[in-house]
Image: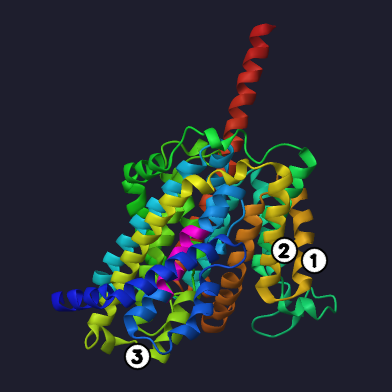
């Protein structure tokens, strides 16, 4: 194994491989910052260029770009409340409030450092976890994945802005919106009203651009205020303060990295679910949960560490079983075919040097991304302080380009504008837009695994899968607990009020 480790490093240390990895990282940062795109688009555009390459340069280019989009997607979430991709949705909860408080540099620094630490931890665990995780991964079925998705949906709904009922209502509306189009199993049109355009459903990137970016610009124009509370050119926070935050919360980083690794191992879950679960974990384990949603740096560190480690976890089933750990890993499998590499057990024995080449790509690409991110973060942090007459047209132009680029249809631009109005109304009446989007993200996973569970185990599948039944009880308890806590608090307040009234009389 030691020989394979050094052989993998030597292959990546070649000037050509390093050069292509740096190119991939720079390209991935740019693609990640553009709303509606992300790692899948970055890798898909680069895939044709890898056919005639050697293994190390090809993987350096592809995986370097994919890893760099993690931080690139976080930038717009933090600065403008516009998720660059679905996986960075959790960054808007506390990243944007930090920007509003004048701590954009700190948030960007914490994001880059957490992604770096998560990426390195993910790479290390990729090297040692394949024999351990395979039997556990194979033990879980669609029923357990269904419960995992429902838990992610309810836990964020109960902790979202506004009332708990409004959070759950927003999550439900997100699910309904995602169900527009063809049924996954029966191919029956749903909620299309005879429209051919709606047969393909509502594009998630398009809806996300409208709900957050366009709605935020509408709010900015209507109120006449500023995107941030004060001039960011004179902000007191710094990038290095964010780096120190990430290292001082090493326990959170480690827990979030393990979570990202585990979610990456489970096929079909995806990085977006990992970011949401990481935020929920950070909230539950924090010593000051009341500050979440108001600019707590832990809400930035947790999701980014998970996303960084998720890539290492996603490669485990890809290499060991030939099952992609996510959409990005599916493109990696396609690249394997073009390069003549066959994933599976033989790759872990006969071609272990190639495995460790991938491990080194994840680690080094994470480092290069962090270095570039820390260098450009002070300049990016000043962008939200631009005059509204500049920033509104600038952001709206990027939104139009991003909405059109999603599927190349002008109709998507119109849909983005409609969701902009919806997002503006939801924000005005304190319905969580983030929870709405989370409902859309998890809808496909919920529906697919529900159909599979019923087909495999029958209508009462929950009683045939003990682990799923235990998870369901856990979901009910965690969802009901905030209602019970509020009821208990209101009862105590009424008792105090009655006692005060009695003493007054």
Image point (24%, 70%), residue name:
128
Mark 3 surroundings: few (<14), some (14-19) or many (≥20) residues within 10 A: some
Q: Secondary structure at mark 2?
A: helix
Q: How many marks?
A: 3
**Mark nearer the viewer, 1 or 3:** 1
Residue holding disc 1: 414
Of all residues, the one furthest to the left in this rendering is: 2
Dominant SS in magenta: helix
Alpha-carbon span between mark 1 and mark 2: 9 Å
What residue range appears in magenta? 62-72
Visible residue check, residue 138 = no
Q: Earlier in the sequence, mark 1 or mark 2?
A: 2
Alpha-carbon span between mark 2 and mark 3: 41 Å
Q: Is disc 1 in contact with disc 2, using a CB cutoff of under 8 Å?
A: no
Mark 2 surroundings: few (<14), some (14-19) or many (≥20) residues within 10 A: many
Give residue 233's position: percent from left, percent from top.
55, 37
Q: Is residue 45 magenta?
A: no
Label ID, residue 400: 2
Image point (46%, 54%), residue name:
303
Q: In the rendered view, would you say 102 is above or below 167?
A: above
Q: Earlier in the sequence, mark 2 or mark 3?
A: 3
**Mark nearer the viewer, 2 or 3:** 2
**Mark nearer the viewer, 1 or 2:** 2
Q: Is residue 69 magenta?
A: yes
Quadrant assignment, res 466: bottom left
Label ID, residue 341: none
Give residue 259's position: percent from left, percent from top.
39, 60
Mark 1 surroundings: few (<14), some (14-19) or many (≥20) residues within 10 A: some
């Amino acid at each position: 194994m030691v020989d394979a480790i050094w052989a993998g490093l030597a292959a990546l240390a070649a000037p050509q491989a390093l050069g292509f990895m740096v190119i991939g990282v720079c390209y991935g940062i740019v693609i990640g910052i553009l709303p509606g795109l992300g790692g899948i688009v970055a890798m898909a555009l680069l895939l044709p260029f890898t056919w005639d390459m050697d293994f190390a340069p090809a993987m350096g280019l592809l995986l370097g770009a994919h890893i760099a989009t993690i931080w690139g997607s976080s930038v717009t979430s933090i600065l403008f409340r516009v998720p660059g991709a679905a996986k960075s949705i959790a960054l808007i909860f506390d990243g944007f409030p930090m920007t509003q408080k004048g701590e954009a540099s700190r948030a960007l620094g914490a994001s880059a450092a957490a992604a770096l630490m998560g990426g390195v931890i993910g790479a290390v665990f990729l090297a040692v976890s394949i024999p351990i995780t395979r039997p556990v991964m194979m033990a879980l079925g669609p029923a357990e994945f269904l419960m995992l998705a429902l838990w992610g949906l309810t836990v964020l709904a109960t902790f979202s802005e506004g009332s708990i009922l409004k959070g759950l209502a927003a999550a439900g509306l997100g699910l309904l919106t995602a169900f527009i189009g063809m049924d996954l199993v029966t191919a029956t049109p749903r909620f299309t009203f005879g429209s051919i355009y709606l047969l393909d459903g509502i594009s998630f990137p398009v809806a996300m651009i409208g709900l957050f970016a366009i709605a935020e610009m509408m709010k900015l124009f209507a109120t006449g205020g500023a995107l941030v509370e004060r001039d960011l050119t004179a902000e007191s926070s710094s990038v290095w303060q964010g780096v120190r935050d990430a290292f001082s919360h090493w326990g959170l980083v480690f827990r979030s990295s393990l979570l990202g690794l585990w979610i990456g191992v489970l096929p079909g879950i995806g990085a977006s679910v990992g970011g949401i679960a990481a935020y929920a974990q950070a909230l539950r384990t924090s010593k000051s949960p009341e500050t979440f949603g108001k600019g707590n740096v832990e809400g930035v560190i947790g999701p980014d560490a998970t996303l960084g480690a998720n890539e290492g976890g996603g490669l485990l089933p890809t290499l060991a079983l030939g099952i992609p750990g996510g959409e990005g890993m599916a493109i990696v499998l396609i690249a394997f075919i073009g390069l003549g590499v066959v994933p599976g057990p033989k790759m872990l024995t006969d071609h272990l040097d190639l495995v460790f080449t991938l491990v080194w790509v994840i680690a080094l690409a994470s480092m290069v991304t962090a270095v570039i991110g820390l260098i450009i973060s002070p300049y990016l942090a000043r962008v939200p302080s631009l005059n509204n007459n500049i920033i509104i047209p600038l952001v709206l132009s990027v939104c139009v380009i991003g909405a059109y680029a999603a599927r190349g249809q002008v109709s998507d631009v119109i849909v983005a504008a409609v969701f902009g109005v919806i997002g503006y109304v939801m924000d005005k009446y304190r319905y969580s837009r983030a929870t709405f989007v989370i409902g859309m993200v998890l809808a496909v996973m919920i529906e697919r695994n529900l159909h599979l569970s019923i087909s495999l185990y029958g209508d009462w599948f929950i009683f045939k899968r003990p682990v799923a039944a235990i998870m369901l009880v856990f979901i009910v308890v965690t969802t009901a607990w905030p209602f019970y806590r509020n009821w208990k608090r209101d009862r105590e307040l009424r008792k105090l009020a009655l006692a005060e009234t009695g003493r007054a009389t």
